[in-house]
């Protein structure tokens, strides 16, 4: 979401650019003040002192030189010398103090910015944004710009004020010596400012253009270091291929950065040469004026200091303006994410959601991801009665997972409606709806946390209730396995990290502190059971969705789990998806989904007797088992 209004050549109207920059600056400043008001105030004071310090030193130097040239007594020189020493001490301390304040300020701002950014991402209702590459690129840039942007804007603004203070002090000094030279030095700074602004806009645009390339490079690098991908990469021998892709993207990024760096080096060299010419001309004028008696030795000293100080401050001013401008352009990505409008409409006054008592209904539901995509669901009408188990079967791509996404309101139907006891899901608070649903998804998550935490994520209210966690694990036939782990339920289920207690207490065989031990991984079937245990924590919810709940299990484990699920489903409303038709034959109702439409509905006996698609698929699977048995 850009705040610039574009015209003909793609640039923004100057007034619009200014208003956009001011708006971004105000937002960055507000974030900075909220994050660290005291540190920011100290930072401002130090910056102002730093801006005045070169001017003070220059004037003290002039006064000392003039008094020495006039033969002043030591008693007259001592206060000036002491003041000059004190100013030098301040000049030595200020950079260290500035560095500390900047680091402390950036830490506080980064923490608040990260909280707001991921809070905004978490507030997204559906899944569409997470499937949009442009949004993912923007989030990546926002993560960097949100943490560093406000700090860079504040640093740039303070640097700008500091430079203004320095320039103002030296200009006043220079005006006393030569108004003409004052004007010349000021005019020499205009090209510097214009060039730096142009470079900042070009660099900000480059970062946006490189976003997809850098994200793709990160994808390849994660593949090459991922344990999930390591087996196939080594078996298929594709490591060199993936590394080549990664390096090609890195070379593309490097080429763009190199071109930008060369352009900046050329521009900066030209500006530096121009500044040297101005300074050299000014020095010749000062020497000539001294020889004619127009300037004293102290005047020459302050003239040289003023010219160098103004040029340096103007260069800093231009650089800080450019950096601040670039930071504001990048900060726009952060603002775009935290101000992102809802991806799905939420009713301003949601209707209350009472416990399910009648049915969940799909009424002529059509769905496609965009007008450019094909229809995935085509007029689905389906009823899930309260207290009954509905099984949904169909070939891959039939639309089963999409139907579940709509039921959880990750998307809204393109046409038609989904009703909960007669209430359209679009009139209900999505958080209330999801609070009523338990689910095991086919693509369940494996969290790099402890076993207890992995289960408790199904209902955070159970995080400190081990009895509930153990009960859920028993129902998933996983309790015995978890108790056998090195730390029982407190074992970390990951080899990506290690626990703090392992870091501190791991000892080698000779009693010396050794290498900390990482956690361990479960097998695929055990992870599947753990996902089931996570769902069982929500056993008092109105609806349970079971999407291929036994896909990763062996035959014996599958039979045990389905026996447990059959007992669980008794008298409860549930929606079961499975490619193994033997697992759904005892459901109260079975619906066959094909090409986005409900092809058949009924129980196992009626569908088998009908001799349609369900009967064909069931016979096909049954014949496979019979053939294997013979």
Image (cartoon, rainbow, N blue to C red):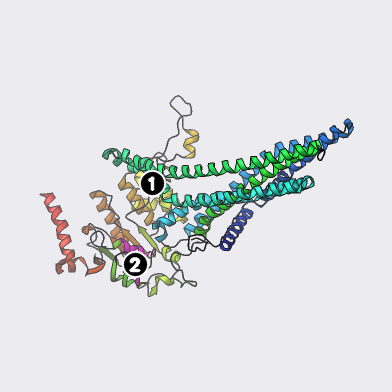
The kind of secondary structure element at disc 2 is: loop
The number of numbered discs placed on residues in the rendered structure image is 2
Side of 230 relative to 150 (left or right): left
Residue 590 on image: x %, y %: 24, 66
Residue 142 in sight from this viewpoint = yes
Seen from the viewer's position, the closer of residues 194 and 279 is: 279
Magenta residues (range):
401-415
Whether tag 2 and tag 1 are in contact, CB under 8 A, the answer is no
The residue at the point 46 percent across, 32 percent down is: 506
Dot 2 corresponds to which residue? 371
Displayed quadrant of residue 82: top right
Residue 523 on image: x %, y %: 32, 44
- Counting residues from the N terminus, which is met first, the one under dot 2 or under dot 1? 1
Displayed quadrant of residue 433: bottom left
Name the mark nearer the viewer: 2 or 1: 2
Q: Is residue 411 magenta?
A: yes
What label does residue 219 carry, if any? 1
**From what the image shows, is residue 568 above or below residue 68?**
below
Seen from the viewer's position, the closer of residues 536 and 515 is: 515
Side of 576 relative to 436 (left or right): left
Residue 493 in sight from this viewpoint = no
Seen from the viewer's position, the closer of residues 599 and 359 is: 599
């Amino acid at each position: 979401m850009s705040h610039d209004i574009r015209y003909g050549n793609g640039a923004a109207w100057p007034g619009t650019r200014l208003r956009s920059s001011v708006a971004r600056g105000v937002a960055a400043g507000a974030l900075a003040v909220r994050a660290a008001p005291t540190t920011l105030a100290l930072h401002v004071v130090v910056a102002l002192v730093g801006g005045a310090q070169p001017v003070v030193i220059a004037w003290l130097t002039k006064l000392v030189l003039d008094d020495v040239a006039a033969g002043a007594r030591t008693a007259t020189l001592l206060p000036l010398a002491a003041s000059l020493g004190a100013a030098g001490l301040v000049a030595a301390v200020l950079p260290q103090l500035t560095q500390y304040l900047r680091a402390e300020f950036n830490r506080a701002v980064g923490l608040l910015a990260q909280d707001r950014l991921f809070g905004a991402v978490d507030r997204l209702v559906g899944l569409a944004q997470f499937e949009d590459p442009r949004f993912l690129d923007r989030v990546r840039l926002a993560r960097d710009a949100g943490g560093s942007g406000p700090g860079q804007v504040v640093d740039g603004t303070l640097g700008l004020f500091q430079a203004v203070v320095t320039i103002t002090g030296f200009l006043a000094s220079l005006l006393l010596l030569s108004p003409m030279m004052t004007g010349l030095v000021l005019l020499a700074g205009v090209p510097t400012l214009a060039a730096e602004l142009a470079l900042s806009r070009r660099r900000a645009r480059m970062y946006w253009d490189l976003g997809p390339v850098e994200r793709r490079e990160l994808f390849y690098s994660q593949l090459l270091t991922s344990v999930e991908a390591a087996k196939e990469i080594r078996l298929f021998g594709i490591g060199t291929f993936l590394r080549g892709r990664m390096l090609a993207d890195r070379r593309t990024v490097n080429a763009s950065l190199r071109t930008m760096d060369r352009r900046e080096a050329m521009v900066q060299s030209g500006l530096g040469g121009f500044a040297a010419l101005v300074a050299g001309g000014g020095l010749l004028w000062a020497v000539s004026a001294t020889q004619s008696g127009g300037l004293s030795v102290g005047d020459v000293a302050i003239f040289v200091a003023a010219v160098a100080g103004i040029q340096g401050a103007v260069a800093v001013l231009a650089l800080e303006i450019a950096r601040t401008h670039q930071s504001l352009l990048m900060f726009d990505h952060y603002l775009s994410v935290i101000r992102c409008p809802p991806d799905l409409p939420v009713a301003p006054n949601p209707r209350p959601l009472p416990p399910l008592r009648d049915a969940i209904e799909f009424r002529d539901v059509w769905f496609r991801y965009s007008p450019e995509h094909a229809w995935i669901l085509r007029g689905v009408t389906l009823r899930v009665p309260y207290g009954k188990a509905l099984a949904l079967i169909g070939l891959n791509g039939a639309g089963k997972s999409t139907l579940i996404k709509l039921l959880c309101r990750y998307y809204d139907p393109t046409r038609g409606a989904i009703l909960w006891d007669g209430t359209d899901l679009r009139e209900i608070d999505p958080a209330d709806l999801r609070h009523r649903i338990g689910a095991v998804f086919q693509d369940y998550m494996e969290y790099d946390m402890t076993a207890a935490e992995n289960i408790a994520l199904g209902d955070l209210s159970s995080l400190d209730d081990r009895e509930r966690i153990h009960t859920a694990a028993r129902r998933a036939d996983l309790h015995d396995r978890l108790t056998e782990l090195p730390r029982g339920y407190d074992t970390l289920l990951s080899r990506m990290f290690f626990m703090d207690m392992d870091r501190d207490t791991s000892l080698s065989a000779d009693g010396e502190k050794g290498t900390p031990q990482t956690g361990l991984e479960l097998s695929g079937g055990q992870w599947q059971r753990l996902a089931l245990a996570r769902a069982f924590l929500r056993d008092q919810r109105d609806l349970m969705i079971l999407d291929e709940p036994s896909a990763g299990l062996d035959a014996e484990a599958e039979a045990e789990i389905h026996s447990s699920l059959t007992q669980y489903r008794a008298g409860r409303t549930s929606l079961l998806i499975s490619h193994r038709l033997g697992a759904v034959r005892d459901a109260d109702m079975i619906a066959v989904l094909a090409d986005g439409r409900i092809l058949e509905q009924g129980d196992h006996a009626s569908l088998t007797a009908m001799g349609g698609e369900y009967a064909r698929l069931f016979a096909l699977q049954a014949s496979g088992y019979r053939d294997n048995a013979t």
